Amino acid sequence: MKYTIKIHKISTVDELENAWNIEDFKELLRRFDFANDTINDLKELRELLFMAIADQDPSEAARIVLDYKLSDYLNEGQIDSLSYEMLVDKISEEYPRIRLHKTLFCVNQLLYKAFNGKFPNTKATIVDFEIFPKKNADETITKEIALKCFTQNLDSHNVILRLFGKQLDGEEQFEEANDIIWNLEKKEIGYTLTTSEYFMSKDEFLKPEFDSEIDFFSED
């Protein structure tokens, strides 16, 4: 399949909108023994939570927040290990945990801000773009399509190219695409794509407009 992609804007951010809500902050405050049910303002709850987090040892604070977000996916030993890895910035080097990466980003940024920089400052990449299928103008653009197209416009050292060559070439299914791209939103004009800077950094994009031809996995 062939596509033409036109990039309008690439942004780097250190926080995602609506990553945390009031109930998240209230539950975390309870877990940090800092409960306050009289406050219902998101900003005030966030400031209170930052105070509660900063009173803890960094790795213990990380363990508490990770347990809240990931106890359905990871056991206690894995959470303890991850709380240490986050502090020393080893997470992105060990990457079978793709489906958890967005959650880890949000946790890391919460801890980074609460501890005034003691945790690594992870970032996200947001791309505003238009995509034009060569055959069917009404084709549904999926995360896999967008990701395969964009990787053809990235520096050759990009981590996706290194880790997922067979999937990009259509030799294997590319289920990981749904977790590498955190969000793909259709706008009035074009789309907005959100992912980790670890996967696509602003400096890795080669051209503002390019053509792409991609293949899909088939069991036949």
Image: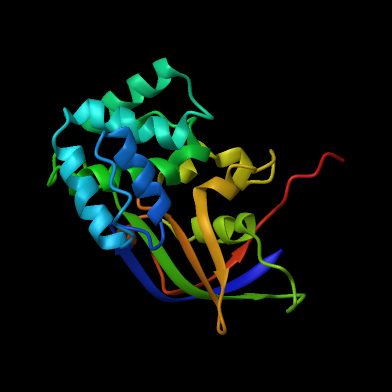
From where the camera sits, is residue 88 visible? no
From where the camera sits, is residue 208 visible? yes
Give coordinates of residue 63: x percent, y percent. 31, 27
Horizontal arrangement in the rendering, residue 203 relative to residue 129 (left or right): left
The residue drawn where x is 75% and y is 77% is 138
Give coordinates of residue 59: x percent, y percent. 23, 27
Give coordinates of residue 130: x percent, y percent. 54, 77
Along the line of sight, which residue is nearer the eye, 151 or 19? 19
The residue drawn where x is 24% and y is 42% is 111
Q: Is residue 66 above or below residue 35?
A: above
Horizontal arrangement in the rendering, residue 108 relative to residue 6 (left or right): left
Furthest residue in direction right, as rendered: 220
Check the image and tell me how it is coloured: rainbow
**Image quadrant of residue 64?**
top left
Furthest residue in direction bottom, as rendered: 188
Give coordinates of residue 155: x percent, y percent. 39, 54
The residue drawn where x is 20% and y is 50% is 48
